[in-house]
Image (cartoon, rainbow, N blue to C red):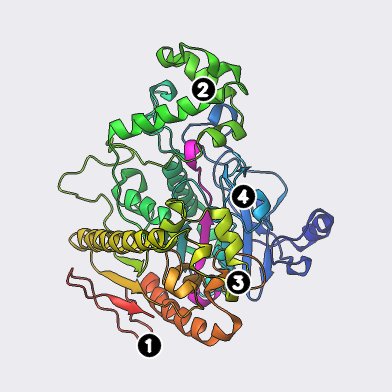
Amino acid sequence: MSGVRNWPIILCLVTMLWTVGVYAESDLYPPLKTSQGWLQGGEHDGVEYYLGIPYAEAPVGALRWRAPRKASAWNGVREARHFSLPCAQIGNFFATNNAEFFNKPFGSEDCLYLNVWTPIVQIGPRPVLAFIHGGAGVYGAASLPLYNGERLSRELGAVVVSMNYRLGMFGALHMDALHTGDPKEDFGNFGLLDQIKALEWVQNNIADFSGDVNNVTVMGHSAGCVSIWSLLKSPLASGKFKKAICLSGIPLTTSSDELAERSQRFINNLKALSKANSAFAQENLDTNPQQLRQALYTLSMEEIVEAGKGIKAMSGEPDGTVLALAENNKLTNPVPAIIGSVRNEASMLLITHTGHVKPEKLWELIHSDWQGLSAGDFFPSLWRRLTYSLAVKFANSSLLNKVDASASLLADQAHPVYRYKFDWDDMEEPWQSLFGAYHGLDIPFVFGNFERETPNISYFSWTKSHIGELERVHRQFIFAFKGFIESEDPNKYSSELQWPIWDGNSNYQQIK
């Protein structure tokens, strides 16, 4: 492991440390010297971990709705054995497994932190895998147990990085009143700028963790994959990654009218909540940008999160600075990639988004006695179930066609590109018939985190009797991803699968 160790410092720190997640006090590891300062991490089962490392200054106070600033160095030794708080959002199972936080303001504005896992054994500079979590741009957290990178780091022999980034109205707000003259800030997508800043941190610091700055792969799921498509178009991200793994996401564009409508809806929600904040009771906010800006900066985190409830995230129009003004869909940073999807992308998404089952009710059903469940627990009538099934069928067809088209778009500009479809759905009823291979099911198979001891959104997907099957499919991902991040070849390591290069003719690698 690169970096200088200082054993005596440990004695001064022991009383300051406490446990985090699955890690224990016995995991204490010698401090690591980085360009930012000394870090006190931990070690578990052959992997060092460093959690809650600031990659940017806290975006609070005057830095709210501003481009991220470089994180300051620190004196002494910084404790890096717990995750930071998630970014501010409405609590949801995409960010926490604690139902007490559901459907209420959750997290913090001070959230621009990342986590690093790296194998202890020193074997030259290691490939780096930087993961961007999903959650529709309004939910999620790198600290979710599903995304724990320890096992992935050990089995890939890679440095694994995960990051928080601003969400919801903190992550994207397109409004003239917030413009500063800095084109990055005026673009309005602060969450994307955060991700670019995290990748910049990787370039400047990952060598301290035995990472190879010249071999960084970005991996994102859902909204994280949508972000990767933006990174492929961003001049600011050029040179910061060499490969991509994009799971269940497509490139999205937004018009100026859609952005303006979204911002106005946010302002209208704030006015409806004006009893809690008199600044938004003023009638002239729509015509006085300076007053509007001042009023926005008086709001609490909770008020902003509440006013943003139900408003979807949007990226922003190409501006020539953050997103290139490209013609003919030309990408700024075309790189070799693996593009993935699951067979039933729409099933779980539609059952909550269409109101058939609210997220809180779904959580309750997932952790109930499955033997007693029936269709009536999810649908008030046979007609509602039929309309759901038809909607899922058409949505799946549309989504999969769009993923295929995106893979072809990249394959026209980068080589090689691979495409997989995840079909494993060997789960108990009613879940197999209801959801099948649902959106996000491939993520625990990638990370190898098959949690069954505590409540979680994937709890219904397997039982302990499935362990052999789970490990078999997990190994398929590990063999392929290890070969790809090392050499762009998912067939480098022998396995039962032989991945074909995508040419747009349905030559998928099926994983089941």
Seen in the picture, residue 48 relative to 106 is either above or below; the reply is below
Q: Label 3 sits on what residue type?
A: Glu
The residue at the point 64 percent across, 50 percent down is 84
Q: Nearer the viewer, residue 143 or 455?
A: 455
Q: Closer to us: mark 3 or mark 4? A: 4
Name the N-terminal-most of marks 3 and 4: 4
Name the N-terminal-most of marks 1 and 3: 3
Q: CA distance from mark 3 to mark 4?
A: 20 Å
In the picture, residue 386 is in which quadrant? bottom left
Q: Residues within 10 Å of mark 3 (few under 14, many from 20)?
A: some
Name the N-terminal-most of marks 2 and 4: 4
Label 3: state its secondary structure. Answer: loop
Seen in the picture, residue 435 relative to 165 is either above or below; the reply is below
Q: Which of the labelled discs sits on residue 451, or is there none?
A: 3
Q: Which residues are magenta?
A: 153-170
Q: Which residue is mark 1?
A: 494
Query: In x, y percent, where is residue 296?
Result: 53, 24
Q: Which residue is mark 2?
A: 271
Name the N-terminal-most of marks 4 and 1: 4
